[in-house]
Image (tube, helix red, strand yellow):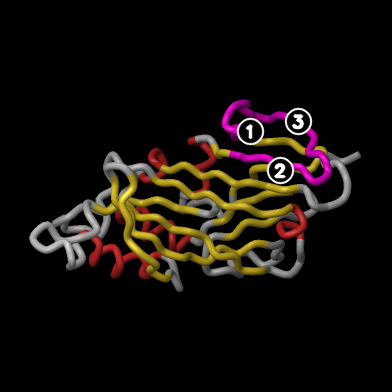
Amino acid sequence: MRKLILCSAMGSAMAFTLAGCKTELSTSVSVNQLLSEQVKTVTSDLLVEVSACGDYKDSRQSSKSLLDTQEKVPAIFANAEYVECFRKSMDSFAHFKVPVSVGNSSITGSTKGIHLYGNGADILVISVPKAIKEKINQIDSSMASKTKISINIKNDTGEVLKMTGLSAFLNDKEPMVISNFSLKVGSEIKLTLSNVSVASALDERFDFTPVLMAISE
């Protein structure tokens, strides 16, 4: 599953009020997809927390929070498509489909949306266009501290890969600062970026943030 959670509050002057709200981006990719010279677009699930799906006076009508979210999400993420609003436990979420680009590109900024890629030196790099960063930071400059980015990676190359993890958690357990490990053929791992890596990914001064580096034989 690929998902990104933001937050919207009813009656706010802004489209999203992110204070105290959790944000999550979760994506699944393969190593061959990351290293491919042909950039492809995969569909991600974007979940935006809203105060309620239905209006408090008439639940058959959409809440103001949901209407605001339906208007503003596509303004941040190009080609975002609204799917539904649902309630999970005590929380309500607006569900959108959002495109994410995957694949190596030699041209910086060649994709308009969130971009995951690899190259000769790196197996996984995340790049967020400056235009998206600007829009997010205009909403909440402290967004990075509330954001969780997780990426599931499958080794479909046919060989064991030796790599170095940078400022991330491996399978939600093992912290990696500059840590070497091997990824077996056909196996899959979950990488969760640290607060430092997330801050770098959303910082307008940086074009990209490396997460996995290849180890040369």
Q: Which SS type dominates the magenta stretch?
A: strand
| Badge 2 density bin: few <14, some 14–19, many ≥20, Cα 10 Å | some
Furthest toward the left, the residue is 57
The foreground one among 211 and 98 is 98
Q: Which mark is nearer the camera, 3 or 1? A: 1
Q: Which mark is nearer the camera, 2 or 1? A: 2
Q: Quadrant of residue 79?
A: bottom left
Q: Is residue 22 left or right of residue 196?
A: left
Q: Is residue 200 left or right of residue 13?
A: right
Residue under numbered circle 2 = 188
Where in the figure is residue 194, as x and y percent of width and height?
Answer: 53, 35
Q: How many marks?
A: 3
> Residue 170 got which mark?
1
Q: Earlier in the sequence, mark 3 or mark 2?
A: 3
Where in the figure is residue 75, as x and y percent of width and height?
Answer: 36, 69
Quadrant assignment for the C terminus: top right
Q: What residue is drawn where x is 40% and y is 46%?
A: 23
Measured in 3D between alpha carbons, the distance from the residue under mark 3 to the one under mark 1, in whole angstroms, is: 11 Å
The foreground one among 172 and 76 is 172
In this view, 109 is above or below 155:
below
Which residues are drawn in magenta?
A: 168-191
- Please say whether residue 172 is one of the residues in the magenta stretch: yes
- Please say whether residue 114 is one of the residues in the magenta stretch: no
Q: Is there CB contact under 8 Å for labels 3 and 1? A: no
Residue under numbered circle 3 = 180
Q: Earlier in the sequence, mark 2 or mark 1?
A: 1
Q: Earlier in the sequence, mark 3 or mark 1?
A: 1
